[in-house]
Amino acid sequence: MSTEDPTTATADPDAVERALRVGLEDFELSDEDRALLDRDDDDLEAEAASGPLPVVAVIGRPNVGKSTLVNRIIGRREAVVEDVPGVTRDRVAYDAEWVGRRFTLVDTGGWAIDARGIHLRVAEQAEIAVDLADAVLFVVDATVGATDDDENCVRLLRRAGKPVVLIANKVDDQRTEADAAALWNLGLGQPWPVSALHGRGSGDALDALLAVLPEFSAMGGAYEREGPRRVALVGRPNVGKSSLLNKLVGHQRVVVDDVAGTTRDPVDELVTLGGRDWRFVDTAGIRRRVHQTRGSDFYASLRTQTALEKAEVAVVLVDASEKISEQDVRVIQQVIDAGRALVIAYNKWDLTDEERRHFLEREIERDLVQIPWAPRANVSARTGRHMDRLVPALDVALESWGTRISTGRLNAFLGEVVAGHPHPVRGGKQPRILFATQAGTQPPRFVLFASGFIEAGYRRFIERRLREEFGFVGTPIEISVRVREKRSRR
């Protein structure tokens, strides 16, 4: 897209895209580049609307390492793991992926035929998980061998008639592989020796799973992954996060005290707001950078970061009655770095007078100048004033967070922008934007292919123009540049 390029926003977007793709062939492209470019808009829409993801249930008796295996597959410590049986009690669904195939992974409590009391409820949940699954990972402790409960579980799986991949877990080295071979006797086919703790053999077992997994679930979306939108309440200590959650819930759900740091663990609560359900998570106040914290503050900061990563949108509470602090700015930046939609709520509005509000506006212009795109709501957690204003702010932020711009429209728009304001000449050269594509959403991520280095100031200019044209209110935007050289003439 040079100043001589005739591509403008008034041209046919599809024609612009085709012309630029042809021109891009003159440049050296990697396999990763081509894979990104081959994912056209129709493919992305079809992928989103294709059908429910296949469901995989992880089944086994208590304490064989099911949750450890789940954590290994999803790539993070999500399922709770302790060296005692019975930690997992419910069916818990997670999004998982292996070599580009996505599926829903369901962790279950331990199954035992003679379960009583709460353990009977746990076993029933495991049986329901099998009924609702398209395939099963049956986990056995290879160091113990097949027990009576394992044998009974095999009978349950045979009655269900679902494809089963037998996982011989806790095979940490070659010496214990013979223990895994003994599990052929269960009659479920090849036992796959795996160390869920260390990852040994997990790739081969997942390859075997994909071989029997259908493309879409036959269960009709038994584990719907939408549900209430997930909102994290974050902010520095004592800005009123717990008071806000209590007001939204309608009762004293969270301990509130004037002493900063009362909340240590994220507190999860279903809230009805604006006639809809939302999943709110109150978090510990972020005091300082994680690497500077100690003891319980350190772990509280980690848990807050985890809660933020699990959320879709964050409401950052700022104490309107006090001067905006460096900590407030740091919390907002943490949300942006996490790629989450953002709403800023100025709390304790009932404690601010006209003079304080005047100075607050000046502080916002000075300290938050880089994020004019974040919607704001002035609220009072103590009185409940203006709580309803959170809903439109959350809605617009989440809508922008998931917005996708077609490749043709994006390139036609950028063609007009660059024609009017080309990149400055540096060292006798003027880098050109060759092609642009949106690589993803949540948050929107754009990739620019360019003939030379694009300066940070010009990237900010592109971001500002994207926001002016397409909105993107309440969401960070990620813009990356891939510099590509022209093919050498031979």
Image (tube, grey):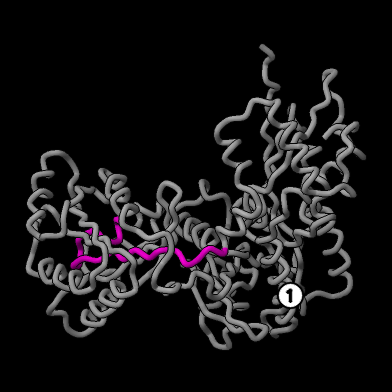
The answer to whether 239 is drawn above or below residue 324 in the figure is: below
Q: Is residue 380 left or right of residue 117?
A: right
In the drawing, does residue 54 fall left or right of residue 387? left
Q: Residues within 10 Å of mark 1 (few under 14, many from 20)?
A: few
Callout 1: SS: helix
Q: Is residue 397 visible?
A: yes
Q: Is residue 171 left or right of residue 456?
A: left
Q: Position of residue 265 (x, y in %)?
A: 46, 67
- Span shown in magenta: 49-69
Q: Is residue 67 magenta?
A: yes
Of residue 288 and residue 391, the one placed in the foreground of this image is 391
Locate residue 391: give its quadrant: bottom right
Badge 1 is on which residue?
392
Q: Is residue 353 above or below residue 446?
A: below
What is the quadrant of residue 335 in the picture?
Answer: bottom right
Quadrant of the snapshot with the C terminus? top right
State the image coordinates of residue 16 (x, y, percent, origin top left): 80, 43
| Residue shown at 46% from the left, 52% from the top | 294
Residue drawn at (8%, 45%), measured in percent from left and top?
Answer: 178
Total number of numbered discs in the rendering: 1
Q: Which residue is depicted at the point 53% across and 63% down?
A: 50
